[in-house]
Amino acid sequence: MIFSVLLILFVGIIPAIYSLMRTWDDMMAIIDNLQFTLPLLIAIIKLVVVWWKKIDLTLALNMIADDWLKAKSKKEQDVMIKCSRIARTILIFGYIFMVLGLNLIVFLPCFGTSLRYITNITDPVKILPLPTYYFYDKDQSPFYELTFMAQVLLLIVASVSYISVDNLLGLLVFHLCGQMENLKERLINMRQYKTFYDGLTFIVQDHIRLIKYFVIIEDTFTLLLFGLLLYLGTIFCLYGFLLVTVLTEKKEMSMIRLIYLIAAMLSICGHMCLHCIVGEILITQCEGIYDAAYDYEWYTLEPKKARTLILIMIRTNKPLYITAGKIFPMTLSMFCNLLKTSSGYVSVLLARHSL
């Protein structure tokens, strides 16, 4: 943990910020710098937050292990497997795109080209994967080779940290969705228990356990999601400005760099969209429990038993929202509003650039 943080901080972030200060008058260089500096900053924040919340996350992972070990029906097991496979598929695709991006960033400088915007200030002779400026002459051997290897190691550590924390969030939420779906089925088939109160007690206790599990997820990832929200808005504005500038002012840009910028913007937007989709799925599962309690044949029960269902309805009427900073719920409507707002700021950057 300490090694990863120090590596990202002293090999990546600090030299990149110093390079940003030296190219402050060049808008293209600023955008090129921020597209690498901001993800590194987000990666180090993710590392610190996950390390800080490791005790709570351990409790959540132990709850997942207990859910897999305890007795369950074939249908409940199939639901859990389905949710875990979805999380696994997302993880696989995330790492595939990560490996492809790393290969382009790392190997192209070996052949004298790069996906970056090259300037004489940050890259006078030899090209590095990241736009950084060091206090020593990096063009001299073996300083260049050592710096290059350090940046490659930095990119691997930062990429794995960035992707893995997001995939951990997906794993936790998809497991919660599976447990919510199983809880709904137990509520619908509550007659399978010996008595009504035995079934109701088990459902209420399991629901409270899942709410505590959700609170761990929300408290751990809410600040990270808020940071990702700001990061997406900033990067979307910068990439939108860059693409509009290239198309309108006919500035030179290699086709491979243009494809990379478009792919990076789509990847970042898709990543945030996945978080919002997961939030929507969780809300749907919570509403499913409410509907199951509402549709239960309460009119066949004694009045005292029927009134107990009202407690479940009251609690499930308040869905479990994953939020960004305890402010913005992670839903598709929020994602669309974010893109709409970010697109508006592109015009602000274009107006500033034209002055």
Image (cartoon, rainbow, N blue to C red):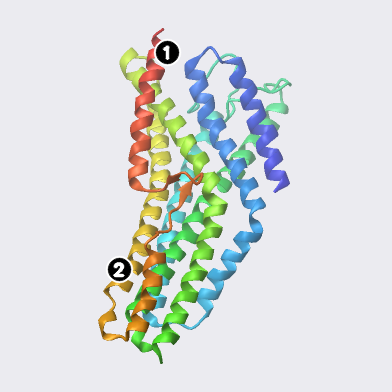
Q: Quadrant of residue 181?
A: bottom left
Name the residue rendered at 50%, 46% in the picture: 326
- Answer above or below: position of 174 versus 183: above
Name the residue rendered at 38%, 46% in the picture: 273
Name the residue rendered at 68%, 44% in the picture: 4
Q: Secondary structure at mark 1?
A: helix
Work out whether residue 205 or residue 322 is closer to the camera in this orientation and state it: 205
- Answer above or below: position of 178 versus 94: below
Q: Position of residue 160 (x, y in %)?
A: 56, 48
Query: Answer yes or no: do the residues labelled 1 and 2 have beta carbons within 8 Å?
Result: no
Work out whether residue 218 or residue 166 is closer to the camera in this orientation and state it: 218
Q: Residue furthest top?
A: 355
Q: Position of residue 72 (x, y in %)?
A: 44, 82
- Answer above or below: position of 30 versus 215: above
Left or right, 288 with reference to 110: left
Identify which amino acid the numbered label 2 is placed on.
Asp
- Sequence order check: which comes first, mark 1 or mark 2? 2
As measured in the structure, the alpha-carbon distance from the residue carrying label 1 to the one carrying label 2 is: 52 Å
Q: Secondary structure at mark 2?
A: helix
Q: Which numbered disc covers residue 291?
A: 2
Report whether residue 96 is seen.
Answer: yes
Neighbourhood count class around disc 1 (C-alpha, 10 Å): few under 14, some 14–19, many 20 upward: few
Q: Residue furthest front?
A: 303
Q: Position of residue 317 (x, y in %)?
A: 37, 62
Q: Which residue is mark 1?
A: 352
Number of dots carrying numbers: 2
Neighbourhood count class around disc 2 (C-alpha, 10 Å): few under 14, some 14–19, many 20 upward: some
Report whether residue 112 is seen.
Answer: no
Q: Position of residue 42 (x, y in %)?
A: 56, 39
Work out whether residue 66 or residue 155 is closer to the camera in this orientation and state it: 66
